[in-house]
Image (cartoon, grey):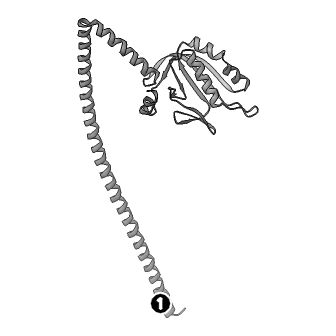
């Protein structure tokens, strides 16, 4: 190879090396810029989060202080109420007895309307669709019949999968589900009832619907329970009250 060719090749190599170096420098600058941008964004997000945390912490402290104030006010009102009630019992026994009678009636109405959480002894009924070989499903009419049996046996409160049953509750088939209080429920169904466990159990196991459940090969179980909690009606209370009255 001639000297001139060697010089051209050397010159070309330098140009190639320079281009590579320039590319690497550019890429490095881009990466560094991106990292710097990400760092700035992360710092900005952290600062914003810290501001939000500080604001929420302050709001939580204010709400906590307000809650404590309301608790103190409620305690003072409750204390005053008990004092007045005690004075009334001594000064006007007829009115006091009348007050107790209407208070008990109101509380019983709230219980029947499902507006209070109830706890006590009772039974738990579990009901599910049958297996694939002898296919049979739980119908809305089955649940309605069970509810009627339990109410007839003196159940104080009943719920299906946590949905409190009240006078306006609907139990309607909706495709593969059953709608209760506007909520779609799916099998398995768990019916809880508060009342005398022996009376409820006897009424259920001697009912027509129980015989139907057995004959339809549905999956079922019923157990007594010493502690059942049924929460208050979670639907539209205004709609409930207007329907009741």
User: Number of labelled discs?
Assistant: 1
* Depth check, front residue: 173 or 61: 173
Name the side, left or right, on which 85 lies relative to 215: left
Name the side, left or right, on which 17 lies relative to 210: left
Residue 52 image point, x, y percent: 30, 47
Q: Secondary structure at mark 1?
A: helix
Task: Determine the residue positioned at 62% across, 14% down.
Answer: 203
Q: Quadrant of residue 39?
A: bottom left
Residue 98 image point, x, y percent: 33, 11
Look at the image and tell me in which quarter the C terminus lies: top left
Which residue, as the protein is rendered here, is positioned at the far front?
245
* Disc 1 crowd, CA 10 A, few/some/many (<14, 14-19, 20+): few
Task: Determine the residue positioned at 26% across, 12% down.
Answer: 85
Which residue, as the protein is rendered here, is positioned at the far right?
133
Q: Which residue is mark 1?
A: 7
Look at the image and tell me in which quarter the N terminus lies: bottom right
Residue 30 image point, x, y percent: 40, 69
Say above or below: 172 vs 149.
Answer: below
Task: Determine the residue positioned at 27% across, 33% down.
Answer: 64
* Depth check, front residue: 179 or 191: 179
Residue 51 image point, x, y percent: 28, 48
Name the side, left or right, on which 186 lies relative to 7: right
* Depth check, front residue: 218 or 25: 218
């Amino acid at each position: 190879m001639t000297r001139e060719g060697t010089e051209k090749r050397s010159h070309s190599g330098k140009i190639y090396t320079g281009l590579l170096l320039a590319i690497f420098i550019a890429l490095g600058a881009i990466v560094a810029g991106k990292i710097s941008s990400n760092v700035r964004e992360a710092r900005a997000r952290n600062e914003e989060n810290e501001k939000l945390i500080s604001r929420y912490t302050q709001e939580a402290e204010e709400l906590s202080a307000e809650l404590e104030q309301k608790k103190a006010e409620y305690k003072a009102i409750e204390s005053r109420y008990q004092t007045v009630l005690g004075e009334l019992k001594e000064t006007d026994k007829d009115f006091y007895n009348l007050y107790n009678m209407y208070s008990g009636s109101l509380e019983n109405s709230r219980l029947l309307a499902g507006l209070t959480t109830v706890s006590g002894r009772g039974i738990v009924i579990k009901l599910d669709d049958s297996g694939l070989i002898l296919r049979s499903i739980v119908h809305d009419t089955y649940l309605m019949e069970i509810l009627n049996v339990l109410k007839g046996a003196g159940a104080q409160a009943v719920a299906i999968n946590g949905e409190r049953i009240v006078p306006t509750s609907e139990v309607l088939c909706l495709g593969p589900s059953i709608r209760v209080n506007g909520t779609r429920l799916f099998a398995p169904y768990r019916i809880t009832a508060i009342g005398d466990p022996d009376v409820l159990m006897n009424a259920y196991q001697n009912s027509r619907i129980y015989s139907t459940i057995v004959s339809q090969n549905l999956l079922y179980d019923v157990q007594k329970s010493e502690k059942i909690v049924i929460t208050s009606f979670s639907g539209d209370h205004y709609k409930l009250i207007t329907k009741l009255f």
